Image: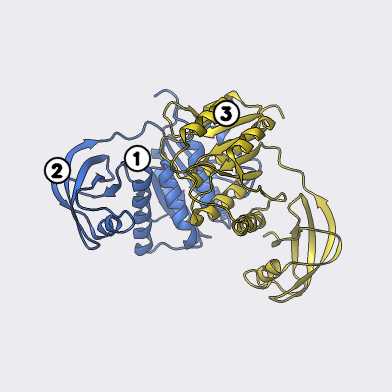
Chain colours: A yellow, B blue
Amino acid sequence: MSAPRLYHPDLEPGRVRLNAGEARHAAGSRRLRPGDTLTLFDGRGNEADAELIEVTAGQAIAHVGEIRLIPRSATRSLTIAVSPPKQARQDILVEKCTELGVAAIQPMHLERSVATLTARRLERWRRVAIAACKQCGRAWLLDVHPPADLAAVLASAAGFDLALVASPADEAERLSLLLQKQAAARNVLVLVGPEGGLAASELAAIESSGIRPCRLTPTILRVETAAIAAAAVILSQPPVGQ
Amino acid sequence: MSAPRLYHPDLEPGRVRLNAGEARHAAGSRRLRPGDTLTLFDGRGNEADAELIEVTAGQAIAHVGEIRLIPRSATRSLTIAVSPPKQARQDILVEKCTELGVAAIQPMHLERSVATLTARRLERWRRVAIAACKQCGRAWLLDVHPPADLAAVLASAAGFDLALVASPADEAERLSLLLQKQAAARNVLVLVGPEGGLAASELAAIESSGIRPCRLTPTILRVETAAIAAAAVILSQPPVGQ
């Protein structure tokens, strides 16, 4: 139906060389040939039609046409600050958040976090985000921020219209109801703690920052599921008053 | 924090033998020993505290105490009729839908479905659902129905308060807005078609059955992501008027 999408961080009209990973993708799973057309995107809103000139498993060269700027979507902008789940579940977190339209993921190191993100893992998160952008047609990459501690995340909260923390407590307000009262909020931050829960001191620091606890479903969710569910609920309704 | 949960389909007080898979789970990843306490559940609302009497990789025997009935949650009851995604993505679909509290998954064979469910795959879906129930504390299993064709799914739609089909069309109403107008709906059916889209004849049959198209996020979602997002949005708000 639509042309295959490949990523090029520095898009310009004329002849461009794709990086090795994209060349492998083009020659391998996509089975593209010279003469095939594709869409190139730079992850910062720029896209262009292009024609493949050369393609082997090792390199791909394309001729890039006119560049068009795709505006950011008019829905909310959501940042998810999350205690990284176990490695096997990290790809699901990043892929699904990208598909759903999350703007940024902020890995957050808390007392009971089960995984530490090395530079190499962070690189993998970024690759997964790019792959998901290709698949779901996003012109703007999901930003993967460098890991931060809770104090840094709390300091950033003031920059958002609405800051929430996912809570398994029965008395926490339902996210969907809370959003109806905050219908104009455009920039939203959601904190998702580790499976073992937030430490008491962390919870106290979060609450004294004015970040409101919210409940997703009546069930108990894994870290990545809580992040995905929050993204689905928040990004499925556009802000009121746009 | 809470006792490990193991599954036993025919729970009764007294001495019970766990099946081989549960025994492996108890002895292996859970490292349980004789004398350890656990919670057994039968997936139909019955739960009991139990004490392990014997446990090896091959067999586990427990002494089961009083059985208590856990009522179904007061939220909506959601059935997702879905064209199965590729195998590697099926586990994510079933696991996340179980965690989020989906009542049943109805695999649906459509013209552009990419995977056929053999009896063996269906068995795997059921195992994944049980594993996720253990983890997330559900007392009622997610039902995995046998695969059906579109005509059978459409015939079942009359039994629901609200029947919807996930649509990537810009003009489709947003699911979150549609739900606000149908706030009393308790039993909800959502159809999720294959990645290649519904065939024109399928779409016509769905629409003439009065099933309403709804849009999730502005992005394009994979099959399993659409199902998970629909579940998060629908199950995160309790029906009004309970």
> Could you give the CA–CA distance between mark 3 and mark 1, rounded to whole angstroms?
26 Å
Q: Is the Cβ of the residue at disc 2 closer than 8 Å to that at disc 3?
A: no
Within 10 Å of disc 1 (Cα), the crowding (few <14, some 14-19, many 20+) is few
Residue A198 pos. (x, y %): 48, 37
- Residue position marked by numbered label 3 in the rendering: A211
Q: How many angstroms separate mark 2 from mark 3 (CA)?
A: 46 Å
Amino acid type at circle 2 is Pro
Report the side of A148 relative to B108 (left or right).
right
**Residue A68 x/y as whole percent:** 82, 52
Q: What is the three-letter code of the residue carrying label 1? A: Met
Residue B1's disc is: 1
The kind of residue on which mark 3 rests is: Ile
Count of picture labels: 3
**On the rendered structure, is B59 left or right of B87?**
left
Give neighbour class at mark 3: few <14, some 14-19, many 20+ (Cα, 10 Å). many
Q: Where, by quadrant of the figure, is residue A209 drawn?
A: top right
Q: Assign a secondary structure to mark 3.
A: loop
**B191, above or below A175, in the image:** below
Q: Position of residue A164 (x, y in %)?
A: 57, 32
Q: Which residue is mark 2?
A: B13
Residue A231 to residue B60: above or below: above
Q: Residue at x 36, y 59 (%)?
A: B124
The chain carrying label 2 is: B
B241 left or right of B20? right
Q: Residue at x 54, y 27 (%)?
A: A207
